[in-house]
Amino acid sequence: MSEYRHRLAALAAGTALLLSSLPAPAQVAAGLTAPETLQRAAEAALRRRVTTSGGEELIVTAGALDSRLRLPACTAPLDAFLPTGAQPAARTTVGVRGASPYWTVYVPVTIETNMRVLVLKRAAPRLASIGRDDVEVQQRRVAGFPTTYVTDVTMLEGRHLRQPAAPGTALTVDHFATDVLIKRGQRVTLLSAVGGIEVRAMGEAMGDASPDGRVRVQNLGSRKVVEGRAESADRVRVGAP
């Protein structure tokens, strides 16, 4: 029994010696770039690129990185950048690179905004016009930038839904299309100024036009085709910028 105890004691002592010789977690990580450092660099780069004009709160969050990454620590500051041709968006990839030694890794980043938006009270069908009674203002944390969202009922005027929308939808500008003011084949009055005198003629629209949009019109008298700006639902001004 005493020999067995001596063997156990020797085994325990050997195990303790082996464990004491292993590097601590901090020592294992020494000389490597921590994932949190990469994430902070990517977030900071986007915060420098994006701003808000109305004081809304932007939330920039870097996504998780592959835990198997083993990037050597750099002697120079890290450089964070957007890939060529990329623009900040709700979901963006930011490159982070080290110069010495050289390496590059790409970090997924999301951008959200804490802001007041117009939200649908009830379901609305495609092509529906949305008015003041159809919406309410709510404070929301939404994806992307403030300019993406409808924040005032005046922004709804002259527009209709491109697709059906569910109750609780935070309305964005992409939900809407501009109403057609003049339709193809419609009879309109052509207006033009000649020597300070306004001249009128009847014409036929050769395409659809949105408010203030450009449209080609055939003069029914001369059969000449001219282009003008849709001034109202039945008038097109020729020569207008």
Image (spheres, rainbow, N blue to C red):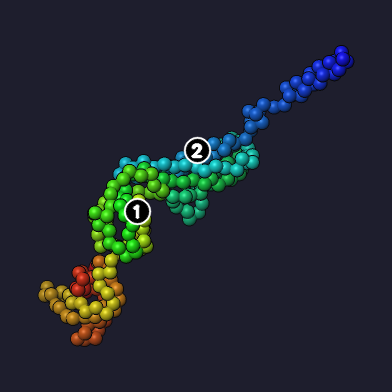
Would you say residue 217 is visible in this rendering? no
The quadrant of the image that shows the N terminus is top right
Which residue position is annotated with label 1? Answer: 167
Where does the image place residue 137, in percent across and percent down from the top left? Answer: 28, 47
Name the residue: 52% across, 40% down: 39
Amino acid of disc 2: Arg
> Within 10 Å of the Cα at label 2, are there few (<14), some (14-19), or many (20+) other Cα atoms?
some
Q: CA distance from mark 1 to mark 2?
A: 37 Å
State the quadrant of the C terminus.
Answer: bottom left
Q: Mark on residue 17?
A: none
Front-most of residues 92 and 114:
114
Residue 91 vs 70, above or below: the answer is below
Picture residue at 67% right of the left edge, 26% below the top: 24
Q: Residue furthest left?
A: 197
Front position among marks 1 and 2 = 1
Where's residue 234, x and y in %?
19, 73
Q: Secondary structure at mark 1?
A: loop
Q: Quadrant of residue 47?
A: top left
Q: Which residue is mark 2?
A: 40
Type of residue at label 1?
Pro
Q: Residue 35: x, y in percent?
A: 57, 38
Residue drawn at the location 24% of the way across and 59% of the way down: 157
Query: Looking at the image, is mark 1 or mark 2 earlier in the sequence?
Result: 2
- The secondary element bearing badge 2 is classed as helix
Please provide percent x and percent y for residue 164. Answer: 36, 61
Q: Is residue 23 left or right of residue 167?
A: right
Let me know if residue 59 appears in the view: yes
| Residue appearing at x 18%, y 77% in the figure | 189
